[in-house]
């Protein structure tokens, strides 16, 4: 029989690595739980692959994701037409390894393009007139440097080295001892002003 262990006497150990899932779920919470957007797809890294769906205004149109496809991690859409979509991709660990690698640029592009093709196949409400915002989702350990400086660095990589389109934004969370978490949202330099105003209102606590 194993000896009794009083867990309250065990030393607390901080996590050795901060992952993007905290940012992904926080973005989901802001839009789905707080703003009543519709959840079409939520897949943290390593989870099973659910169906993908599109809200048509009355119900969900359901489809499937090919497991050989490049995949995104989050799809949410505004509850009323004209529909806006936010499609999230967890990117932090890959940027650490290869911040300007052409293979990563291609992987991100394929994930978004294939996702949009799938959504178009699933429902007529997803068409050329649909507004799609890309969310590049990241989390960072504050021990590696000043969060604002880190955000400046990643912003340059995301919107220049990785050649992301204008309707893209970075969603970065940094654990903070005082507030629990610090969130930094950075927009593409040419992000449309009306869309930016809308998202800022949605993503501000």
Image (cartoon, rainbow, N blue to C red):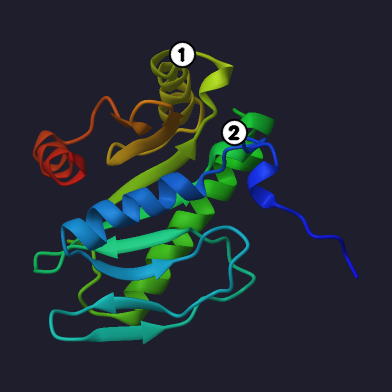
| Residue at image mark 2 | 95
Q: Quadrant of residue 3?
A: bottom right
Q: Residue at 11% of width from left, 33% of height from top?
A: 193
Label whose residue precedes the other's in the sequence (1 or 2): 2
Distance Cα–Cα, label 1 vs label 2: 18 Å
Residue 115, compared with residue 198, is above or below; it is: below
Q: Quadrant of the N terminus?
A: bottom right
On the image, the x and y values in percent for residue 128 come to 23, 62
Q: Left or right: where does residue 60 sit relative to residue 198?
A: right
Residue position for label 1: 146
**162 left or right of 86?**
right
Vertical side of 189 occupied by 38: above or below? below
Name the residue nearer the viewer: 65 or 5: 5
On the image, the x and y values in percent for residue 127 come to: 24, 68
Q: Residue at x 49, y 77 (%)?
A: 50
Name the residue located 40 percent from the left edge and 69 percent from the top edge. Answer: 41
Residue 25 higher or lower than 190, as above or below: below
Picture disc at residue 7: none
The C terminus lies in quadrant: top left
Residue at x-position 41% and y-position 22%: 151
State which quadrant residue 32 falls in. Answer: bottom left
Does residue 98 show up? no
Q: Secondary structure at mark 2?
A: helix
Task: Give the camera-side residue of 30 and 113.
Answer: 30
Mark 1: few, some, or many residues within 10 Å (few <14, many ≥20)? Answer: few
Residue 111: percent from the left, percent from the top? 51, 56
């Amino acid at each position: 029989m194993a000896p009794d262990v009083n867990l309250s006497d065990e030393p607390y150990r901080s996590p050795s690595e901060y992952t993007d899932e905290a940012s992904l779920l926080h973005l989901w919470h802001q839009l789905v739980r707080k703003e009543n957007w519709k959840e079409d797809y939520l897949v943290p890294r390593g989870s099973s692959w659910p169906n993908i769906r599109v809200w048509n205004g009355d119900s969900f149109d359901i489809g499937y994701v090919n497991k050989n496809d490049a995949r995104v991690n989050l799809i949410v859409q505004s509850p009323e037409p004209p529909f806006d979509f936010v499609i999230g991709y967890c990117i932090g660990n890959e940027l650490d390894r290869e911040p300007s690698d052409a293979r990563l640029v291609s992987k991100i592009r394929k994930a978004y393009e294939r996702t949009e093709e799938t959504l178009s196949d699933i429902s007529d409400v997803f068409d050329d007139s649909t507004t799609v915002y890309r969310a590049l989702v990241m989390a960072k350990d504050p021990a590696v440097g000043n969060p604002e400086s880190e955000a400046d660095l990643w912003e340059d990589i995301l919107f220049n080295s990785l050649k992301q389109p204008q309707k893209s934004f970075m969603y970065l969370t940094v654990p903070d001892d005082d507030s629990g978490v610090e969130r930094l949202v950075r927009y593409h330099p040419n992000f449309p002003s009306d869309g930016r105003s809308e998202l800022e209102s949605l993503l501000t606590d």
